[in-house]
């Protein structure tokens, strides 16, 4: 079945609607309405009339995005971006450095104040920092946060979401996003798939990334099996 959001292209969304999607795309666990309002106000997001987004306006925005299929919410749980929409939003965010940088600072600080953090990065922080490093093209940081993610996976494998490369290859938008990442970031995303740790800035980066993309696309359609 076609996702509802496919009928509403991301370029048609108002800036305030897009800002909500940006925040939720970077927060896989989702966020509550009060916290979203605080984040939007801290980021100086304005509505169509140039006014600061208030609680009533945020309610309208969330209702629109949920109706269009961009976000989902189960009663009593935070708002979350729809699985099929996430790569589309991340792809748009990849090309908006100013917005990405603004959310980087706000969300990193926001999650560091979470009671769950307790002085060290929790899973939500690890995922955020990993995806920001991927989008920023920061190879060293991406490798570091991916290693932390894998360490967390060893402890909580049953509850962890998909690894980055699996999310990127989930749909066409994700594959397009992957193709636009720098070579060494592609290799970092594909570390588990390729089963070969790749050192940043090696001549084989493009070949490894291409191998990863081709292998993952083939296995997703059931036409191949992983190489050793």
Image: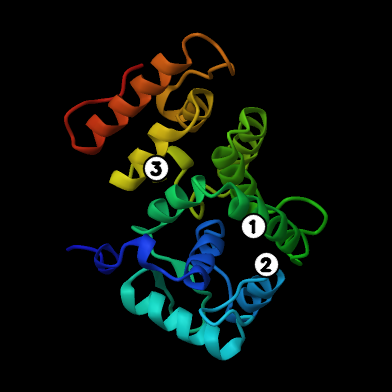
User: Disc 3 or 2, which lies upstream in sequence?
Assistant: 2
Which of these two is toward me, 165 or 156?
Answer: 165
The one of 122 and 170 positioned closer to us in this rendering: 170
Question: Circle 1 sits in a helix, a strand or a loop, which is it?
Answer: helix
Marks 1 and 2, the one that precedes in the sequence: 2
Depth check, mark 3 against mark 1: the one in front is 1
Instruction: Residue 106: name its quadrant.
Output: bottom right
Q: Secondary structure at mark 2?
A: loop
In the picture, which quadrant includes the N terminus?
A: bottom left
Q: Nearer the viewer, mark 3 or mark 2?
A: 2
How many neighbours does mark 2 have within 10 angstroms: few (below 14), some (14-19), or many (20 or more)? some
> Can the viewer see residue 135?
yes
Residue 173 horizontal/vertical position (percent): 33, 47
The residue pinned by badge 2 equals 43
The answer to whether mark 3 and mark 1 are in CB contact below 8 A is no
Q: Is residue 57 above or below residue 31?
A: below
Location of residue 59 with respect to 222 vertically, above or below: below
Residue 94: x and y in percent read 50, 45
Determine which residue is flagged by label 1.
Answer: 103
Instruction: Specify the farthest residue to the front.
Output: 49
Q: CA distance from mark 3 to mark 1?
A: 20 Å
């Amino acid at each position: 079945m076609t996702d509802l959001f496919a009928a509403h292209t991301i370029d048609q969304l108002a800036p305030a609607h897009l800002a909500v999607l940006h925040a939720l795309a970077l927060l896989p666990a989702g966020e509550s309405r009060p916290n979203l309002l605080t984040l939007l106000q801290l980021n100086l997001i304005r509505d169509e009339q140039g006014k600061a987004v208030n609680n009533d306006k945020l309610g309208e925005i969330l209702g629109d995005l949920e109706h269009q299929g961009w976000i989902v919410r189960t009663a009593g749980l935070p708002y979350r971006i729809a699985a099929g929409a996430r790569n589309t939003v991340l792809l748009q965010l990849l090309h908006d450095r100013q917005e990405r940088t603004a959310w980087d600072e706000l969300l990193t600080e926001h999650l560091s104040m979470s009671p769950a953090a307790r002085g060290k990065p929790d899973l939500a922080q690890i995922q955020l920092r990993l995806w920001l490093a991927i989008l920023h093209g920061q190879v060293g940081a991406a490798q570091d946060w991916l290693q932390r993610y894998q360490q967390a996976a060893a402890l909580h494998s049953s509850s962890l979401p998909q690894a980055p490369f699996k999310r990127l290859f989930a749909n066409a938008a994700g594959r397009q996003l992957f193709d636009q990442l720098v070579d060494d970031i592609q290799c970092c995303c594909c570390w588990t798939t390729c089963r070969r740790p790749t050192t940043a800035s090696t001549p084989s980066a493009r070949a490894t990334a291409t191998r990863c993309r081709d292998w993952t696309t083939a296995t997703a359609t059931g036409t191949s099996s992983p190489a050793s």
